[in-house]
């Protein structure tokens, strides 16, 4: 049996509908890609470590630099001064991944933060969230 398709109406999609669909798809893909880096600015930050939990040895945190311990960035801007920050970037929730050349770096969209947590280079518009830390002997612990 042979079918004649000429008797069936062909669906028509106008240009406006096609462009709107393509835009919606692009937006969905962009949101999915950003969320795979760790969430969005509105997602809750990772919980702070339990008070007293050891984060690093003081000797492992270089003066003028820092280290990342779990969800906490520990910096030592000047000798004997330690500061703690969340490792979640304030731009779109990615995790910062290194502290080099006096900057805390986010790999996702290239935001950089100074050792005091303030923004050095955007697109992040606000500083890293602070974390409460203290030094006990030769250890940096959460407080």
Image (tube, rainbow, N blue to C red):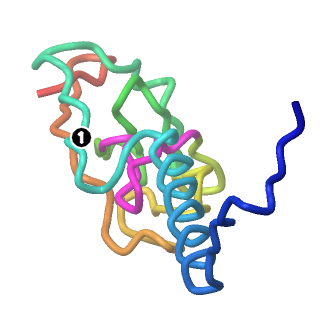
Q: Position of residue 38 (x, y in %)?
A: 43, 39
Asked if residue 93 lies in the magenta stretch, the reply is: yes
Q: Is residue 53 above or below residue 19?
A: above
Q: Residue at x 21, y 13 (%)?
A: 53
Which residue lies most toward the right here?
Answer: 2
Q: Which residue is mark 1?
A: 45
Quarter assignment of residue 137: top left
Write the start and end of the magenta stretch as one range: 86-97
Q: Residue at x 63, y 66 (%)?
A: 11
The quarter of the image holding the C terminus is top left
Say whether residue 125 is left or right of residue 103: left
Eyeballing the image, is 13 above or below 41?
A: below
**Total number of numbered discs in the rendering:** 1
Give the residue at x 20% y 21%: 49
Q: Nearer the viewer, residue 74 or 46?
A: 46
Q: Main secondary structure of the magenta part?
A: loop
Q: Position of residue 3 (x, y in %)?
A: 83, 43
Q: Is residue 51 magenta?
A: no
């Amino acid at each position: 049996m042979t079918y004649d398709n000429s008797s069936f109406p062909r669906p028509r999609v106008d240009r406006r509908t096609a462009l709107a669909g393509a835009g919606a798809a692009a937006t969905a893909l962009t949101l999915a890609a950003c969320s795979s880096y760790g969430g969005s600015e509105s997602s809750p930050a990772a919980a702070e470590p339990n008070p007293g939990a050891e984060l690093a040895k003081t000797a492992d945190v270089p003066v003028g630099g820092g280290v990342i311990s779990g969800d906490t960035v520990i910096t030592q801007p000047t000798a004997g001064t330690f500061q703690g920050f969340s490792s979640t970037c304030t731009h779109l929730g990615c995790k910062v991944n290194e502290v080099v050349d006096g900057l805390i770096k986010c790999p996702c969209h290239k935001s950089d933060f100074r050792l005091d947590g303030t923004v050095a280079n955007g697109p992040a518009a606000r500083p890293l969230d602070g974390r409460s830390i203290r030094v006990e002997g030769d250890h940096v612990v959460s407080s």
